[in-house]
Image (cartoon, helix red, strand yellow):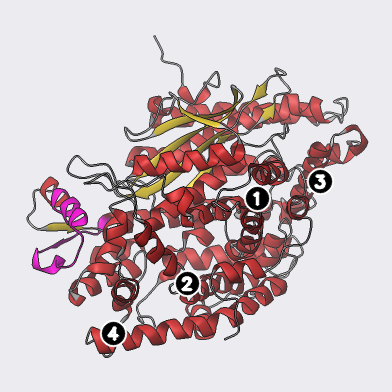
C-alpha cells in the first residue's frame, strides 16, 4: 500500500516528521500543475473579476504550493541532509519559475485591474493595491525578450542565493579546533564541558571548538589565550571566502556575491529603475536610497562620538589593566568583557547561571499572556527534531494561533534566529472556515550539558523575546485575508517593530524576577545583580549602533550602485566613514552576510534601525502608563495589540503606528533608551 505524500496532506498540522527527500519532486510537481491550472481558469474571459471568486480557485491552489514548499525550505534550513538539499535544489528552479510566471502574467494582471475596489472591505482593498504593485515589480508590464530575461534572472538569483546559504552553512560546519585544557583557561565551565563532550563524540582528545555561536562567542569573550582567539577569529571571518584556508576555499562566495549584484541591477534596469535599491524601496516605508542613507548618517553623527569614547575606554583598559598595548581584532571581545566585569562587577557567565531556558520561556509567556490577554499552552504536533516544542495561543477558550519552538544549535541547522510562517490566518473562500495562523520560532542556543537545563545568556534571552515578537505579530492578527494578515503585507522596514518592541521587557525587574532561577540553588536573580546589568545596559551602545549602521550603509551603497561595485572597495569606504574599530585585512564578513545575499534584506538591512525608532517610541507608551510598582497597563497593551498586532498588513504601518501613538514617530525615545540622548 502506498503511503500518502505528507507534502500533499493539508487536512491538519504539517507532518514534518514524515517528509522524505523523495516526497519533494512529485508533490511540488503536482502542486505547480494544480496552481497552473487554477491560473488558466481565472484568466478566462468569462471568469468573473471578483475577489472571492478568484481567491476560491487561484489562492487556494497557490497557498497549498506555498505551504508545501515552505515545509521543504524549513526542513532544508533546520535539518539539512545531502539528500534533502539535492531534492530542494532540484525543485527550486521549478518553484521560482512558477512564482515568476504568476507574478508577470499579463492576463491575471488585467483581471485584477478589473476588480472594483468598492466591492472590497478595507483589508481586501489594501491586498489589491499590494497585488497591483507586485505585478509591476514582477515584470507584468514587460514584453518579449525583456520579460523572458526577467524570468531568467529570478531563477538565477534564487539558485545563487541558495548556494550562498549552503556555502555559509558548510563552511561553518566544516571547521573544528581541538584545543587543550591550558588554551581554554578563562572559558566558562559549561562551555568547556560541552566542548569536551563534543570531542569525545568524535573520538578525539581535548576540547572541540566550532564556529557555531554557542561555541565561538564564549571563547572570544573569555579565553585568555590570544593565540586561540586569533585562530578562531581568522577561521570565522574568512568563512566562505577566498581567504579561507585549505579545502575550506571550496565554499568561496566571492563570485556569487558579484553575480547576485549584477543580476539585481539588471533586474532593476529592466523595470526602469537606476538601481536595485530603488526597486527594493518601492513597497517599503522609506521612499528613496538617499533618504535611507541620510537617516543612517544622521544616526551615525549622533552615535559616533559615543562609539569613539567606547573605543578609547577599551584601549586604556587594555593598556593599563591587561598589558595589551596594541589590541588586535580578535582581542576586542575579550577586552570588552574584561572591562565590563571590572566596571560593573559582574560577568555574562554569572548572569547566565540564572537564565534556565524553561524558566525564561515561562516568564516570556507570562508577560505576553498578561499584556495581550491570551493563554499559552503546550500542544501536540509532529516535529522535525526531538527538542522542538509546540504551543497554542488562546483567548477566552478560542484558538488564535499555534507555534513551534526550535531552540538548539546543531549540525545541519542554519545559524542565527528567525521566525517564519507555516500558514496564515485566512477566512478560507473554499470552505468558509477560519484558518488559524501557525508560526515557527527558530534559535541557535547551546544545549544543556550534564543533565542540566540549557542556560541562556542575556543576549539569548533578548533574541528569544525578539523572535516571539515576530510570532505574536503573525499569530494575534484579526485580519481575515491571508495576503495582509499577520506579517503578510507589512512593509519590510516596519516588520521589525513588534520584535524589537519585545526586547525592552528583557530589561525590566518585574519581568526578569519571574523568569530566573539559579541552576544550582534555584534562587532568583538578585536585585543587586540586576542593577549592575541595568547600569551596564548601554555599555558600548555607541559601538553597537555604528556597527549596525556600517552593515546598513554597506548594503545600501552596494545596491544603490548603477555600475558593478567593487565589494571590497565599498566595504573599505563604508568602514572608513562609520567604523571605529580596525579590522584584519583578511576579514571577509560580506561573504557570510546572509541577510542581504540570501535572506531577503537586500537594500533593506537599514530596516532594523528604521524600525527601532518605531519600536522604542511604541515602548515609551508603556513606560508612560506604568504604575508605581512598575506594572504595565493592560489597557496600553490592548491598544498596542489592536492598533498594531491585530491590524497586520491591512493598512500602511505608519497608520497603525499613529493609531497607537496618536502622532508621527520620534527618534528621541531610541536615543534615550540607548543612553545617547544628552549632548556630547
Q: Which mark is residue 151?
A: 1
User: Can I make out residue 569 in this image?
Assistant: no
Q: Which residue is mark 2?
A: 544
- Quadrant location of the C terminus? bottom right
Q: Which residue is mark 4?
A: 318
Q: Give the spatial CA distance, label 3 vs label 4.
A: 57 Å
Q: Circle 1 — which element?
A: helix
* Residue situated furthest top in the rendering: 1
Q: Which residues are magenta?
A: 174-197
- Quadrant location of the N terminus? top left
Q: Nearer the viewer, residue 411 or 315?
A: 315
Q: Is residue 585 above or below residue 341?
A: below
Q: Could you tell me residue 53's position as x and y percent?
A: 80, 25
Label 1: few (<14), some or many (≥20) within 10 Å?
A: many
Check contact, mark 3 vs mark 4: CB within 8 A.
Answer: no
Look at discs 3 and 1 and give the one toward the viewer. 3
Label 4: few (<14), some or many (≥20) within 10 Å?
A: many
Q: Which mark is residue 129?
A: 3
Q: Give the spatial CA distance, label 3 vs label 2.
A: 38 Å
Q: Give the spatial CA distance, label 1 vs label 2.
A: 40 Å
Look at discs 3 and 2 and give the one toward the viewer. 2
Amino acid at each position: 500500500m502506498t503511503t500518502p505524500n505528507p507534502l500533499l496532506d493539508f487536512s491538519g498540522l504539517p507532518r514534518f516528521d514524515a517528509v522524505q527527500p523523495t516526497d519533494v519532486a512529485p508533490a511540488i510537481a503536482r502542486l505547480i500543475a494544480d496552481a497552473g491550472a487554477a491560473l488558466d481558469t481565472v484568466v478566462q474571459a468569462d471568469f468573473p473579476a471578483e475577489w472571492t471568486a478568484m481567491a476560491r480557485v487561484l489562492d487556494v491552489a497557490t497557498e497549498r504550493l506555498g505551504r508545501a514548499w515552505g515545509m521543504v525550505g524549513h526542513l532544508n534550513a533546520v535539518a539539512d541532509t545531502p539528500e534533502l538539499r539535492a531534492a530542494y535544489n532540484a525543485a527550486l528552479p521549478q518553484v521560482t519559475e512558477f512564482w515568476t510566471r504568476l507574478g508577470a502574467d499579463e492576463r491575471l494582471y488585467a483581471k485584477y485591474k478589473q476588480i472594483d475596489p468598492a466591492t472590497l472591505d478595507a483589508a481586501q482593498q489594501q491586498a489589491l493595491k499590494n497585488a497591483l504593485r507586485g505585478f509591476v515589480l514582477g515584470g507584468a508590464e514587460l514584453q518579449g525578450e525583456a520579460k523572458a530575461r526577467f524570468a531568467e534572472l529570478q531563477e538565477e538569483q534564487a539558485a545563487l542565493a541558495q548556494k550562498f546559504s549552503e556555502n555559509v552553512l558548510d563552511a561553518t560546519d566544516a571547521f573544528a579546533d581541538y584545543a587543550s585544557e591550558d588554551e581554554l583557561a578563562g572559558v566558562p565551565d559549561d562551555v568547556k564541558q560541552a566542548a569536551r563532550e563534543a570531542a569525545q563524540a568524535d573520538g578525539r582528545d581535548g576540547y572541540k571548538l566550532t564556529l557555531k555561536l554557542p561555541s565561538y562567542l564564549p571563547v572570544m569573550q573569555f579565553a585568555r589565550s590570544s593565540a586561540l582567539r586569533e585562530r578562531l577569529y581568522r577561521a570565522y571571518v574568512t568563512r566562505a571566502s577566498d581567504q579561507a584556508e585549505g579545502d575550506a576555499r571550496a565554499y568561496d562566495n566571492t563570485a556569487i556575491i558579484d553575480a547576485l549584484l549584477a543580476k539585481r541591477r539588471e533586474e532593476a534596469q529592466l523595470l526602469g529603475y537606476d538601481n536595485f535599491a530603488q526597486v527594493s524601496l518601492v513597497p517599503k516605508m522609506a521612499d528613496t536610497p538617499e533618504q535611507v542613507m541620510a537617516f543612517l548618517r544622521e544616526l551615525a553623527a549622533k552615535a559616533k562620538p559615543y562609539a569613539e569614547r567606547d573605543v578609547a575606554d577599551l584601549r586604556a583598559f587594555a593598556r593599563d589593566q591587561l598589558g595589551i598595548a596594541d589590541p588586535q581584532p580578535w582581542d576586542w571581545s575579550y577586552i570588552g568583557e574584561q572591562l565590563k566585569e571590572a566596571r560593573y562587577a559582574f560577568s555574562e557567565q554569572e548572569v547566565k547561571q540564572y537564565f534556565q531556558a524553561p524558566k525564561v520561556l515561562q516568564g516570556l509567556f507570562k508577560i505576553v499572556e498578561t499584556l495581550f490577554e491570551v493563554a499559552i499552552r503546550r500542544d501536540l504536533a509532529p516535529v522535525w527534531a526531538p527538542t522542538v516544542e509546540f504551543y497554542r495561543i488562546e483567548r477566552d477558550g478560542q484558538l488564535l494561533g499555534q507555534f513551534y519552538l526550535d531552540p538548539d544549535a546543531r549540525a545541519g541547522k542554519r545559524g542565527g534566529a528567525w521566525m517564519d510562517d507555516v500558514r496564515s490566518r485566512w477566512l478560507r473562500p473554499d470552505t468558509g472556515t477560519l484558518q488559524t495562523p501557525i508560526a515557527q520560532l527558530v534559535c541557535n542556543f547551546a544545549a544543556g550539558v550534564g543533565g542540566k537545563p540549557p542556560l541562556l545568556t542575556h543576549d539569548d534571552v533578548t533574541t528569544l523575546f525578539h523572535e516571539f515578537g515576530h510570532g505574536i505579530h503573525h499569530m494575534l492578527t484579526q485580519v481575515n485575508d491571508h495576503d495582509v494578515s499577520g506579517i503578510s503585507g507589512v512593509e519590510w522596514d516596519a516588520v521589525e517593530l513588534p520584535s524589537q518592541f519585545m526586547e525592552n521587557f528583557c530589561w525590566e525587574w518585574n519581568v526578569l524576577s519571574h523568569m530566573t532561577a539559579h541552576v544550582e540553588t534555584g534562587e532568583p536573580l538578585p536585585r543587586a545583580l540586576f542593577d549592575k546589568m541595568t547600569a551596564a545596559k548601554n555599555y558600548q551602545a555607541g559601538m553597537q549602533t555604528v556597527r549596525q549602521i556600517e552593515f546598513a550603509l554597506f548594503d545600501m551603497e552596494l545596491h544603490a550602485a548603477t555600475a558593478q561595485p567593487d565589494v571590497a572597495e565599498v566595504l573599505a569606504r563604508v568602514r572608513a566613514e562609520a567604523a571605529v574599530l580596525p579590522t584584519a585585512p583578511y576579514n571577509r564578513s560580506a561573504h557570510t552576510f546572509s541577510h542581504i545575499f540570501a535572506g531577503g534584506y537586500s537594500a533593506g538591512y537599514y530596516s532594523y534601525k528604521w524600525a527601532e525608532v518605531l519600536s522604542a517610541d511604541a515602548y515609551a507608551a508603556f513606560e508612560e502608563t506604568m504604575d508605581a510598582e512598575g506594572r504595565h497597563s493592560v489597557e496600553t497593551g490592548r491598544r498596542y495589540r489592536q492598533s498594531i498586532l491585530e491590524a497586520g498588513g491591512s493598512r500602511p504601518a505608519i497608520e497603525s503606528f499613529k493609531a497607537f501613538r496618536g502622532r508621527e514617530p520620534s527618534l528621541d525615545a531610541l536615543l534615550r533608551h540607548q543612553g545617547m540622548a544628552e549632548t556630547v
